[in-house]
Amino acid sequence: MVKVALPRLEHGSFVVAALLSLPALACYTGTPGPSFSMPYDSVPPDTLLAYISSLQFDDREWAGDGQRLMVGTCPGSCSHGPLVRIEPEKRAHRNKTSSLQDNQGRIIARMINQSSTPYPKYNLAADDTVYWAVREVGSYAGDSAWGASLYISTRGLRGTHPTAFEYDSALVERHPHSFYAKHALAHWVWSDTDEEKWGSCNKDGCCR
């Protein structure tokens, strides 16, 4: 805790000292990047796991989402699969767009597989936690931009799952200027043929 004493005013009046918490101020700067400069998939597993352990994920019920994800092909041959919860990194809604544009990007959410059934689409092994990073985001065309998603498997990093990293595209959608996000959020989104994810990823919008 840092105590900031404001100056004395004239005529004997005082300004009440303001108490400022550096961690509280830090939450407005977005998800912190790692100390290393290489992409997540180019550093030793222990180094990446140590960085991941420094992040803060919001496990409050309303901030994230949990449901059984679809397996198979809908309509006609789909069914309920593993129960998976998605939770946002608490500061993801404060990220600058520039933080997502290099080959490192930011981790914006985690997916927790609460079942013994894997879900390959998001690189989830049984009883696994995957971290969703968004990187290499290009320039906006209208209110959308494309980048890359990286799904980082905890079990993969620890050698109990064959794939530590999987790659996919990422769509970044810009919010209207009147929209102001007070909290980071992450949710599942159902489509007619597939299961999709949605998460806060920068000050301007969200990622899919």
Image: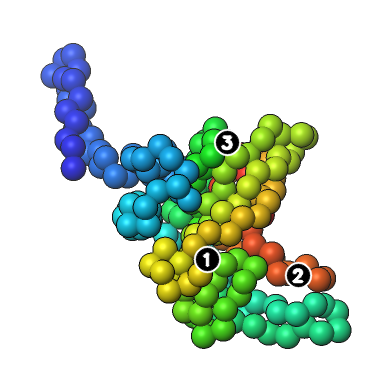
Q: Secondary structure at mark 2?
A: loop
Residue, disc 3: 101
User: Is the residue marked by circle 3 packed among few (<14), some (14-19), or many (20+) residues within 10 Å?
Assistant: some
Question: Which image quarter: residue 199?
Answer: bottom right
User: Split into 4 quadrants, where in the image is the N terminus?
Assistant: top left
**Residue 156 locus on image (x, y percent):** 46, 67
Residue found at the far left of this picture:
12
Q: Is residue 14 above or below residue 110?
A: above
Residue found at the far right of this picture:
76
**Residue 43 locus on image (x, y percent):** 40, 48
**Closer to the eye: label 1 or 3:** 1
The foreground one among 14 and 156 is 156
N-terminal of the pair, mark 1 or mark 3, is: 3
Residue, disc 1: 163
For the question of whether residue 112 can be seen, the reply is no
Q: Is residue 52 above or below residue 161?
A: above
